[in-house]
Image (cartoon, rainbow, N blue to C red):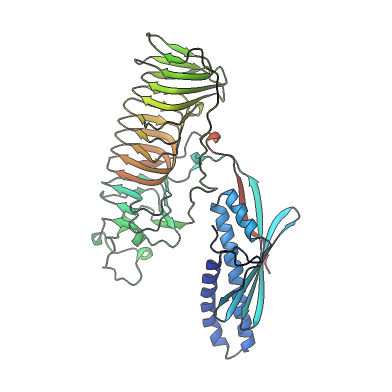
Amino acid sequence: MLPWFYRNEQGIVMPLVLVVFSALLLLVFTALTVTSAENKESVWHSQKIQAYYLAKSGAETLATYLMETAYTAEFAEMVQILDDISNKTSDPVKIEDGRLLIETVRRTENGQEKLDIISHGNYKGVTETVTVTLQITIEDGEDYDPSTAQHAVVVFDTDTVKSFQLTNGAFIEGDVVLNTTKENAVVFRGGGDFNIKKGALYLPHGADPHWVIDTDRGASNGEAPPEYKKPGLPDWQWINNWAFWKNIEEGVKFMTMPAYPSAVFPEPVFPDFPHLPPAKNPIFTTPQDKVYYLTEDGYYEKIHPTSGRTIKVDLAGGDRIIRVKHFQMDGNIELMNVGKNSKLILYVEDYFSTGTWSFNGNGNPENVQVYYAGAKPIILNGSTRFSGNIFVKQANLTLTAGGKMRGNVVTLGNHVEVSGGSSAESMALYAPLAHVEMGGSGQILGAVICRSFSRAGGGNAGIIYKPVGYQIPGEFFASRKSITINYDENPWR
């Protein structure tokens, strides 16, 4: 939503608050610089300079707003924003002795769509006009793939205290990105070494790490490095025991934060399940001590390998598409006759139960796609081995007690647990609505994208960032259009 509203039919939907604050700051600055010059120059020239800076402030602020919003906004939202502001004129805004008015002209030049922002600044009756031109580019985006993540952890939560916690000596290897400025949102406890190793903690621009980070490392950790000194406080006065530089090997850094949902981190699209003909053997179990072969697409009431027995799914060099109401694992699922791009695509309606089993355990994760629509939690435990990609519509997911997984998880559930010696290799865990909880010696080799995160204890790193080796299927995300906005060549005049 844009930060101001229509005042009349000629009014323009623009970020007035941002314009006003930016203009006020520039007015204060220019007032200080111009006052000393008034003794040498005419009052008219002084007012002309004030009017120019007021006009440029308005144009620059709106341009910056549009470019940054295009980076994070959904395509449809950005289309609406541009439609709302294009070819409009704002109501004049009074700022002390000045006034600001902005026009926009949207046009096409040599096949390139452009937006002229024409800003009129008036100071004590003297008017100056500044124009900046932006390029608008609309592209058909590729299927989004979170397996290309460049950070160990990305946390979206902006409102919760303790949205990111590493306690009892827990640590992570790789960069951590947090979209929060909340007090005590980051908690570090215990451990004599870094809590974030081989990486930095990224916060939004303007965030105060002394305010955001709560650590138990206090004055005994020595004087703050110059970049972390708190203005106005003596070196001996500590905030929240804030020797946080001892927690983060590569320090605190700042960046523009992505949001969810956005063009950068889109909302997953859980599919409608296909209508398939009933299978000839709708209740597929393994009553005898032998290998069973599943060779037919279709709808099954139940698939249940029992007593450690094996079902071999014949992909016949292509895809095998199965929809099942009740999927229970007390045995093994193996793939056979796997072609170059073959997949087992498994739609599970309302029951996904796991025992001691192997699902494509030694195979390529890219050959398996599982969609689970039920509410009962998925638990991968014991000697469970799973190699594939899972899309969970609503259920919680637990990987515990030595369970092992290769591949990626996309979930719209609200809780994911990795604990008890379990591990996930080459994984992108995309859980934008979930709290991800790690404990014991549970470990992820890959990347995590989540609402909030906690890791307690354990001798191993909770997450070790590694480029994910297996791509998340494009079918988990809608193909997307994107809008980018940049300055035109020689934009100012």
Question: Residue 24 in the image: x percent, y percent?
Answer: 52, 75
**65 with respect to 443 (left or right):** right
Q: State the residue in front, 78 or 186.
A: 78
Q: Residue furthest bottom?
A: 39
x and y percentages locating residue 104 in the rendered image: 67, 64
Q: Quadrant of the N terminus?
A: bottom right
Instruction: Identify the residue shown where x is 34% and y is 37%.
Output: 418
Q: Is residue 215 left or right of residue 261?
A: left
Asked whether 295 or 212 is in front, the reply is 295
| Residue at the extreme left | 220
- Residue 8 position by quadrant: bottom right
Q: 32 above or below 72? A: below
User: From what the image shows, is residue 191 above or below residue 244?
Assistant: above
Q: Is residue 488 left or right of residue 469?
A: right
Residue at 48%, 54% in the rendered image: 257
Residue 476: tell me if it is visible: yes
Q: Please identify the quarter of the rendering in which residue 341 is found.
A: top right
